[in-house]
Image: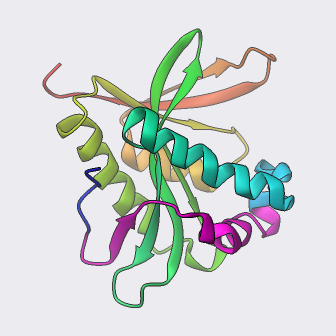
Amino acid sequence: MILPDDTDRIRFRQYVPEDLDYVFLMFSDVRARKFYPEMDDSENNRRWIEWNLNNYDESGFGLWVIEDRHSGGFLGDCGLTYQPVEGEQVIELGYHLVAEHRGHGFVTEAGRQCLGYGFNVLGAEMICSLVHPENLASRAVAARLHPHNRTYLKPDGTERLIFWTESSTG
């Protein structure tokens, strides 16, 4: 599998089953639990890793672990997955960081690499990020990564924001 290119500060790698403690850490703070309350369960953390392993096998991509290129430390994850939006499957750029690493530009940096991967390697026509309206930090990142945004309703009637970028070759 081809991964996004590393940057000066981060490297990408696939999830492995041994990343379970890292996934728990990534979703363990109050802010992350507000948007991912189900991730306080170790079984759901295991499923998160399995979901990504399945995505790698089925789609050739998924959320990848991002690590500090110098220390090797776990920063979080960032990558591409298929998500349902308004009856269509779209490629979403998703991202999550361990609390202590937020605010340092890691997700914006990783997100730009994943956008390049999606357009240049996958040939995607559009890549989006789906954001809970109350997640101000995620909204700020999505606004840096994507030029367009609007609201949409999930099938259960809850409102979300979709930020998106279209291919420059499309």
- Does residue 11 belong to the magenta stretch? yes
Q: In the rendering, at what x and y percent does residue 143 appear?
A: 45, 44
Q: Which residues are magenta?
A: 7-31
Residue at 64 percent across and 72 percent down: it is: 22
Is 103 left, or right, of 116 in this rendering? Answer: right
- Choose top left, top right, bottom left or bottom right for residue 113: bottom left
| 90 shown above or below 48 | above
Kindly give the residue lying farthest to the left in the view shown.
Answer: 169
Q: In the rendering, at what x and y percent does residue 52 appear?
A: 54, 47
| 86 shown above or below 132 | above
Q: In the rendering, at what x and y percent does residue 75 appear?
A: 52, 74
- Please tell me which residue lies in front, 30 or 65: 65
Is 163 left, or right, of 115 in this rendering? Answer: right
Q: In the rendering, at what x and y percent does residue 82 appear?
A: 50, 29
- Does residue 118 belong to the magenta stretch? no
Kindly give the residue lying farthest to the bottom in the view shown.
Answer: 71
- Please tell me which residue lies in front, 58 or 28: 58
